[in-house]
Image (cartoon, rainbow, N blue to C red):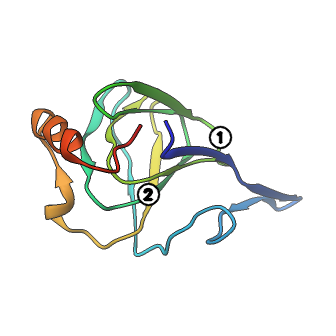
């Protein structure tokens, strides 16, 4: 899908451990205004079930293994986040679901905007109508 990029970010290793990071204008093209994380969701439990009209995100899993499924109503694509140096850069407009594949997994998200309930589409049928009217589309 054109609006989702999987990127391998830099890892700096030392005797004290590993450090990884992503940066604006190198890895992502937007300012980060909110960071949140999802944790303690049990194995095989699904979350998400929404799309964003304007919000862009970076998703990564610093611990565990999470499957992220995206659709634009016409095609579906899944990504596995199981390495702290693997990130997904997600443009607006994609319906998403998250599945914990390993107990104790953590999904971190850096978002381009502060929380705004009006940016969410939480009904899949409503999403399909919105996506069909969206001139930019997500294909």
Looking at the rendering, in which quadrant would you find the C terminus? Answer: top left
For the residue carrying disc 2, how many other residues have a C-alpha within 10 Å: few (<14), some (14-19), or many (20+)? Answer: many
Q: Quadrant of residue 124?
A: top left
First reached walking from the N terminus: tag 2 or tag 1: 2
Contact between marks 2 and 1 (CB within 8 A): the answer is: no
Q: Is residue 50 left or right of residue 17?
A: left
Q: Quadrant of residue 73?
A: top left
Residue at x 49% of width, y 36% of height: 1
Residue 45 pos. (x, y %): 30, 29
Direction right: furthest residue: 15
Badge 1 is on which residue? 83
| Nearest the eye: 45 or 115 | 115
Real-space Cα separation, disc 2 to disc 1, in angstroms: 18 Å
Residue at x 14% of width, y 63% of height: 118
Q: Secondary structure at mark 1?
A: loop
Badge 2 is on which residue? 57
Q: How many tags in the picture?
A: 2
For the residue carrying disc 1, how many other residues have a C-alpha within 10 Å: few (<14), some (14-19), or many (20+)? Answer: some
Say the numbered circle drawn on residue 127. Answer: none
Q: Nearer the viewer, mark 2 or mark 1?
A: 2
Q: Quadrant of residue 103?
A: top left
Direction front: furthest residue: 135
Residue 131 pos. (x, y %): 23, 42
Q: Secondary structure at mark 2?
A: strand
Residue at x 15% of width, y 63% of height: 117
Residue at x 15% of width, y 44% of height: 122
> Would you place residue 90 above or below residue 14 in this image?
above
> Would you place residue 34 above or below residue 137 in this image?
below
Residue 13 pos. (x, y %): 85, 57
């Amino acid at each position: 899908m054109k609006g989702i990029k999987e990127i391998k970010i830099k890892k700096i290793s030392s005797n004290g451990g590993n450090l990884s990071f992503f940066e604006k204008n190198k890895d992502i093209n937007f300012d980060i205004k909110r960071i949140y994380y999802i944790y303690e969701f049990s194995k095989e439990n699904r979350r998400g079930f929404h799309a964003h009209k304007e919000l862009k995100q970076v998703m990564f899993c610093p611990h565990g293994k999470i499957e992220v499924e995206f659709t634009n109503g016409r095609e579906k694509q899944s990504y596995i986040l199981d390495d702290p140096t693997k990130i997904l850069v997600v443009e607006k407009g994609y319906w998403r679901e998250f599945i914990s594949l390993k107990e104790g997994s953590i999904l971190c998200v850096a978002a381009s905007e502060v929380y705004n309930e009006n940016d969410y589409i939480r009904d899949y049928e409503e999403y399909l109508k919105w996506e069909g009217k969206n001139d930019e589309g997500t294909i």
